[in-house]
Amino acid sequence: MAKYSALAIGKWFVAYAETEEDADTSNMRVQKLLYYAQGHYLAKNGVPLFDEAIQAWSHGPVVPEVYHEFKKFRSNPVELDRSDSFTFSDIDEETTQFLLEVWTAYAQFSTWALRNMTHSEPPWKNTFNGGHNVPISIEEISKYFALF
């Protein structure tokens, strides 16, 4: 069982972008950051960061539970509701440091650049079949990110 839900990690990226970087983060961007976080966490720790499946959708890897939570924002920046109980202390220090590394490595790229990067990588390329709801296996993600 993973330490966190994908939604908690997604909220961390949204909150970090808003509060620390004064940056906007769309749902698509959150999806790509989740994919890269899961991949690098698997490579580093041998276990998933979150248990929810990542699926191969037309615009790249997607965690459906997080997508549906944030889809009301469409392509606009995701904002956490004031009533949302998420705080940075929900994520332990070690994981926070890891997420900062992922942010530093990938936030420099535009959302569309991230989308295009995922389209060139084997986990998505080997799984996408023209439709939605095709899970990218943890083994496929782990095998690819072990190369880094």
Image: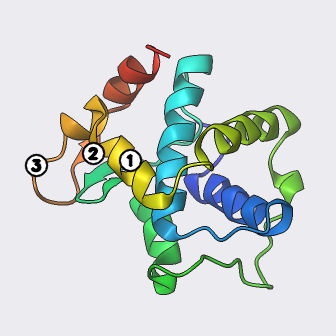
Name which residue lies at 23% across and 57% down: 133
* Amino acid at circle 3: Asn
Above or below for 44 versus 39: above
- Quarter assignment of residue 98: top right
- Labels 2 and 3: the sequence-earlier one: 3
The quadrant the N terminus occupies is top right
Mark-to-mark CA distance, 1 and 3: 14 Å
User: Relative to the observer, which residue lies in front, 29 or 80?
Assistant: 29
Q: CA distance from mark 1 to mark 2?
A: 6 Å
Mark nearer the N terminus (1 vs 3): 1
Q: Which of the numbered marks, if any, corresponds to residue 135?
A: 2
Q: Amino acid at mark 2?
A: Pro
The residue singled out by tag 1 in the image is 54
Q: Are marks 1 and 3 in contact (CB under 8 Å)?
A: no
Which of the 4 quarters of the picture holds residue 106? top right
Disc 1 crowd, CA 10 A, few/some/many (<14, 14-19, 20+): many
Front residue of 45/2: it is 45
Q: For the residues carrying marks 2 and 3, which lies nearer the camera in this image? A: 3
